[in-house]
Structure formats: structure tokens, C-alpha cells
Image: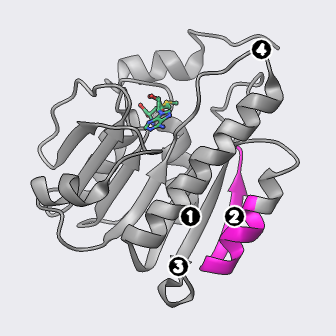
Amino acid sequence: MAYKPNDHFAKKAKKEQYVARSIYKLQEIDKRYRVIHSGDQVLDLGASPGSWSQYASEVIGEKGRLLGIDLKKVFLSLPNAVFMKGDILTLDFGPALELHNFTKPFDVIISDMAPDTTSSRFTDQMKSLELCEMALDSAHRLLKSGGNFVCKIFDSGDAMGFRDELKKYFNTVQLLRPKSTQQSSKEFFMIGLGYKKSLQ
Ligand SMILES: C[S@@+](CC[C@H](N)C(=O)[O-])C[C@H]1O[C@@H](n2cnc3c(N)ncnc32)[C@H](O)[C@@H]1O
């Protein structure tokens, strides 16, 4: 099944002024599992072009704050969000957090990071897994006890190993393939609820 660039969700996103159709994946995850709450401080990994940040920004409201990071620039201006260009594989979070005054641990870390795909499905799966491991590493450093985590992963034999790793650190782990996911896509999402900080 081929990728459909202008399907129902792409049209809906345009109409509702979201910069990408991915918004509906996070919206479905959040409606189901209540990952993000009003007033939360959110770290959005792989934020560009910014639809997850737009959604999270609405949910957290004026008392919340969001830091979005991506290899690519985010051309969005949201009242409660700041964006920075950076590679999660090499980024030194310390100066970035200090610069933007993110002093307390994050309530939620969301990662929609995905590698540029190649002709090798195996390579893509391994790169996706590496990004997931880095997102989890960020959680170990920056997520508060009891915090929530969302991570996109490409399906592979090793994906369930990552699910098992998450199970060690979160009270509950859920897997979801949102309805808005293109049929041709091999991605799905892992949702960790209730981070157990002391175990890390
Ligand atoms: C599917 S897009 C994210 C869409 C975004 N959640 C939205 O709703 O607009 C995946 C993003 O992951 C980013 N990405 C991939 N590898 C990364 C890395 N090592 N560090 C930071 N961002 C990365 C890509 O640049 C790309 O913008």
C-alpha cells in the first residue's frame, strides 16, 4: 500500500491549521492514555515541523512550557514553547536547558523521531531503535518520577526488547498504532506511564 500524501488526515490538519497530519497520532494517544496535562512541562524530541508541539502547547496551556528539539528548524511561534536545533544523538542538554530556563524535571517526554528512510528496512529499524534508546536515555536524565513517555518505533524483532526495557522503568507500558497511521507505515508507538525514577 503506497504512502498517500493528501489523505483525509492531511486535509483535516490543513483545515485545522496544524502543520502536519502527525497531530492526530498524538491526539489519539493522549485521548486514550491521558499522557499530557494542563500545566505540564513537556520535552518534544523530533519536533519539526511542529504539529505535536502545537497539540501539546494547547493541552498544557499558559501555565505549561514546552521545549522542542529537532535536527531541522521549527518555524512556529507558540506562546509557551521554545525550539532549538540539535541532534539528540550528540546533544549536551545542560546548556540548552539552562539557556531556556528549564530548571525542573519534565512531566512528559514525547518522541516522534524517525530516521530518514533508506532502501534497507533493517537499517531503518536499527536507526529507529537507536533514537528510541536515546529518548529513553533522556527520560532517565530529565523525566520526573511519575512522568509519562511516548516514543515512535519502527516495527522489528528488537522492538519488543525495547518494550521490555520500558516495562522496567514505567508502571504501565502500552502499545498503539493510531488510526491516522498510513497503512504503508511500519511505525507504532510505545507509551510509558508513571516513570519509576528510583530504578534508573
Ligand atoms: C515524523 S517527524 C516529526 C513530526 C513532528 N512530531 C510533528 O508532529 O510535526 C520526525 C522528525 O525526527 C527528526 N529527527 C530524526 N533524527 C533526529 C535526531 N537524531 N535528533 C533530533 N531530531 C531527529 C527529523 O528531523 C524529523 O523532523
| Sequence-first tag of 2 and 3 | 2
The correct choice, above or below, for 69 with respect to 107 in the image is: above
- CA gap between label 2 and label 4 equals 30 Å
In this rendering, the label closer to the viewer, 3 or 4: 4
The answer to whether residue 100 shows anywhere in this view is: no
Q: Position of residue 64 (x, y in %)?
A: 20, 61
In this rendering, the label closer to the viewer, 1 or 2: 2
Q: Position of residue 33 (x, y in %)?
A: 56, 64
- Say which residue label 3 marks: 194
Q: Within 10 Å of the Cα at label 3, are there few (<14), some (14-19), or many (20+) other Cα atoms?
A: some
Determine the residue located farthest toward the bottom in the rendered image: 198
- Tag 4: residue type? Ser
At numbered mark 4, what does the secondary structure look like: helix, strand or loop? loop
- CA gap between label 3 and label 4 equals 37 Å
In the rendered image, the quadrant that contains the C terminus is: bottom right
Residue at left offset 37%, top offset 35%: 70
Q: Position of residue 112 (x, y in %)?
A: 52, 41
| Sequence-first tag of 2 and 4 | 4
Check contact, mark 2 vs mark 4: CB within 8 A: no
| Sequence-first tag of 1 and 3 | 1
Tag of residue 119: 4
- Say which residue label 1 marks: 33
